[in-house]
Image (cartoon, rainbow, N blue to C red):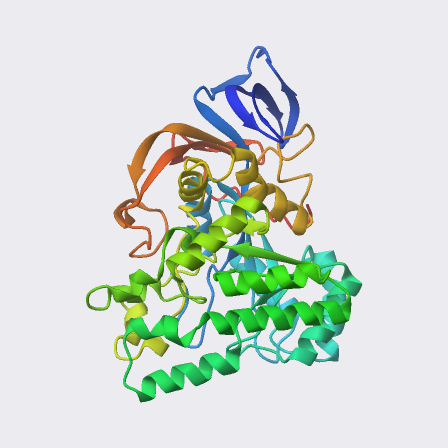
Amino acid sequence: MIIIKNGTLVRDIEYKGDIAVEGKKIVRIAKSIEPGPGDRVIDAQGCFVFPGFIDAHTHFQMKNAITTTADSFETGTRAAVMGGTTTIINFASPEKGGTLRAAYDESMKKAEGCCSSNYRFHMEIVDWNDSIEAEIQDMKALGITSFKVYMAYDIRIDDAAIYNCLRAVKKAGGLLGAHCENGDLLRAKTAELKKNGELTPAAHPKSHPVEAEAEAISRLAYIGRLADYPVHVVHLSSADGLAELRKARLMGIKITSETCPQYLVLDESRYHLPGFESAKYVMSPPLRSKSDQAAILEAVSSGEIQTIATDHCSYNFAGQKSLGLDDFSKIPNGAPGVEHRVPLMYTALVCSGLITTVRLVELMSGNPARMYHMYPRKGLLAEGSDADIVIYQRDGERRIEAAYQAQNVDYTPYEGMSVKGSVKFVLLNGIPIVENGILTKPDMGEYAGNA
């Protein structure tokens, strides 16, 4: 048995207590637990004890038309657990004309046996036909309860297809998330900028205006109302988008939202760096203004945003981002972040006094566990729950530097930022796999689709 002693447990309140772990489960929580012969004691003095954090938005080993993300399931999940994330939900992406089952099989083939965090999948819907509609009903048996559509790019589906997809997801009892940007507007703005000779990364945010996000959120909300079923907005980035969420909720529409660390700690000034440096911040949606950032931070504090995930989509600056050296529209969109989410959000949100540790757990563990059918097995510290546990040293300060990260990418958008505290221990399925900040037992992750 493993006994975690002297820590500050973060549940619905913070309090001093001990946790006993046996096998893969938490078997006892009490004010004090005395270890017996043969028990291992982990001293959590000066630490918060959190339920394992869940990153519900990653793109590991993702192929696009010209390249593949820098992080595989192996490297991405190693970075995840070292940063306190014990479960990731990655996107399974069918080929155009392919089947959902083939996408699931391909994702399992990539992930099995090499993940250092637990893992499961969202299924992307990039086509719509009777076969895909039927397959949605089969996904639950494979542990997939969440789906994603795009309202932009070559893999988008039209509004009628989104409506019919949502009805099928409703029948399956799942959740449909959407990348909310108006694809026609993005294409028109990109063509306009290029015609005017604006080819540097500074043109990227201009090609993805806040109006394109807000319009798409509004459209998704109305589709949800027509289908009489909840919808979910991923990576919310703007005050205008938030206004559409609020409007929809006032109308009685059920709509939830996720935001990402980059929209809470970075802003559009990053698109005006010397040379080609700004390519590191080309992501979609792009970084927004300080006023957008303030609006999203306030919404995180007030409970209007349900989850914080990373949208981790890593491309190397050299050799991948540089594909767009002469044309911003050819820069692969995305940025890394899975390793740094927990310390960044602890520093920016908790240490600033904006939210409590309880709210942090709600945003990054409890709520995603509920939304993706893993609660109460995951997402909280409770007797009978999985022993996915993060022991976070609250003292100390360090700087984020790419030279010392586990992410398999040659930069971090958070280079030089100071964060408070650090991940000291991580238990995954009852096994200590990170000890004193070092990953000692890699590749111990399990498929969490049956949670």
Q: Quadrant of residue 333?
A: bottom left
Q: Quadrant of residue 1?
A: top right
Q: Position of residue 204 (x, y in %)?
A: 36, 73
Which residue corresponds to the image point at 63% horizontal and 73% vertical from the top-left?
A: 219
Query: Could you say which is closer to the camera, residue 199 or residue 57?
Result: 199
Q: Tell me if residue 331 can be seen.
A: no
Q: Position of residue 149 (x, y in %)?
A: 60, 70
Q: Tell me if residue 432 can be seen.
A: yes
Which residue corresponds to the image point at 68% horizontal and 42% vertical from the top-left?
A: 375
Which residue corresponds to the image point at 62% horizontal and 29% vertical from the top-left?
A: 23
Residue 185 appears left or right of 278: right
Residue positioned most to the bottom: 195
- Vertical comparison of 315 with 13: above or below: below
Q: Position of residue 161 (x, y in %)?
A: 68, 78
Query: Could you say which is closer to the camera, residue 120 or residue 226?
Result: 226
Which residue corresponds to the image point at 61% horizontal and 59% vertical from the top-left?
A: 246
Residue positioned most to the right: 171
Q: Position of residue 451 (x, y in %)?
A: 68, 45
Q: Quadrant of residue 205?
A: bottom left
- Vertical comparison of 313 with 377: above or below: below
Residue 314 appears left or right of 120: left
Residue 29 appears left or right of 66: right
